[in-house]
Image (cartoon, rainbow, N blue to C red):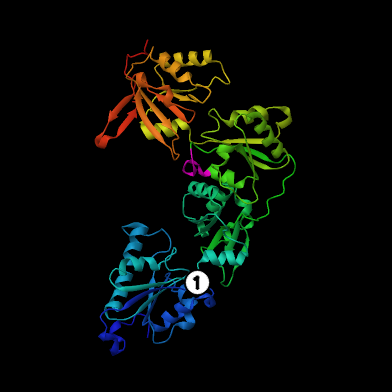
Amino acid sequence: MESGATAENAEGTRSSRTTGRLYGVGLGPGDPSLMTVRAVQIIAEADVVAYHSARHGRSIARSIAAEHIRADHIEEALVYPVTTETTDHPGGYRGALEEFYTEAAARLAVHLDAGLTVAVLAEGDPLFYGSYMHMHKRLADRYATEVIPGVTSVSAAAARLGTPLVEGEEVLTILPGTLPEEELTARLAATDSAVVMKLGRTFPAVRRAFEASGRLPEARYVERATMAGERTGDLADTDPDSVPYFAVAVLPSRIDAPRPERAAGSGEVVVVGTGPAGPLWLTPETRGALAAADDVVGYTTYLDRVPVRPGQARHGSDNKVESERAEFALDLAGRGRRVAVVSGGDPGVFAMATAVLEVASQDLYKDIAVRVLPGVTAANAAAARAGAPLGHDYATISLSDRLKPWEVIAERLRAAATADLVMALYNPGSRTRTWQVGKARDLLLEHRSPDTPVVLGRDVGGPAESVRTVRLADLDPDEVDMRTILIVGSSQTQWVRRGGGQEIVWTPRRYPEGQGASA
């Protein structure tokens, strides 16, 4: 039957049905021979074949299924009113599409109400960035529905490249090229493998995102996979003016992928912070640096937080050999290796960045590139769990006297207390240092009220996390160890109990006028 024929013109036997059945039929990436047997079967059984097309009337979906569409099929061409975001519709581009989908669903509902079977054709898989899903969301709750999966363009692209897409424990991220460039950059940096779809006009921004994330050398390009005009190549060599919408950018599996040859002296050391605990605290930039490294170097406890990757060498060591660890990492980089030095929290806060930079300042290593990537600090993590005790000016002080004498620590505590600063106290105690917390408490009580709130954050983000608040006068040194950080409030810090028993600690951003530091 001609396109647009009504349900009333169908065979009389159809009218005895109550309502018809809706099928979303995945056609695969373009080659008709990649349609599934089930897809061909459903098209053959359908009364109505529907497909989306642009205003020029040509439909890729119909062209894929053309040999299975009969003259007696009722055809419903669902023609998009717009294909770009330029429209005079009062609701804008989204409004125009919303109206179109609603009207298209209504057209299909007429056939379904008449008892006819409707097959909506969809390139790739119907529920993977496909137009069919808009019909599904509007009709599936009213009519019996079945979705026939299809081979996606992602699988087709990987097959055409002839390289594994993901292997083992690798993570695959699928991204629309329409995302903001910075978002694309962050996600590309953080993942193992990726496919970026919806290229065309987005290609220049997508390419910049690959370059900014450091992944451009790995990236491949696939255009019209399995279709006429198919093209593959390196993304870096692709002419932006030649890229159509039906193209994808691919980051294949890194496992067994050849690592680039680098000359001696062309390596790099990246010092990264893993945050206070596990993977939830890693930034995308840090994830990317860890994944790209040839070697990972660090204190074994922190190294254990980093996923094991095939082909990557791991070098764990004791916590008391920071300078040696830094020299080892720089020596590796000097031989052309890309090295990630792992640190807990933020690498620049009582951590490995200082040790690496100190050694890197020597003439022997001055030509080796060194970068420091930030991480979530223990102070920030504990403060967030407690509320916002660091909401105003604060000082960060280590209570460890291993690298500086206690007299210096005491002087700094007095200065911060006199200035009425909130204090984040790192390294408060260990098995061999048991008296510093008591000394610090007594010193601070000379300047602070006994009721000053003190946050004790232990193993924040870890399985044994404990965050609680006590009065300064009640701070018990026996309850503090090396995994604990203390946040001591100022004279303005508030400790409030809210509904449900929640306790919060926060320091106002505004300091009272005319009120100086405590005596």
Total numbered labels placed on residues in the image: 1
Label 1 packing within 10 angstroms: few (<14), some (14-19), many (20+):
many
Tag 1's secondary structure? loop
Q: Position of residue 252 (x, y in %)?
A: 59, 57
Q: Residue at x 45, y 39 (%)?
A: 462
Instruction: State which quarter of the image contains the C terminus.
Output: top left
Residue nearest the viewer, comparing 471 with 82: 471
Disc 1 target residue: 28
Q: Position of residue 21 (x, y in %)?
A: 33, 77
Q: Which residues are magenta?
A: 277-284
Q: Does 15 lie within the magenta span?
A: no
Q: Position of residue 345 (x, y in %)?
A: 51, 34
Which kind of residue does numbered mark 1 sit on? Answer: Gly
Q: Residue at x 51, y 70 (%)?
A: 29
User: Relative to 350, does residue 93 appear above or below in the rendering?
Assistant: below
Q: Is residue 69 visible?
A: yes
Left or right: 188 with respect to 458? right
Q: Residue at x 35, y 25 (%)?
A: 470
Residue nearest the viewer, comparing 320 with 337: 320
User: Relative to 480, does residue 328 appear above or below in the rendering?
Assistant: below
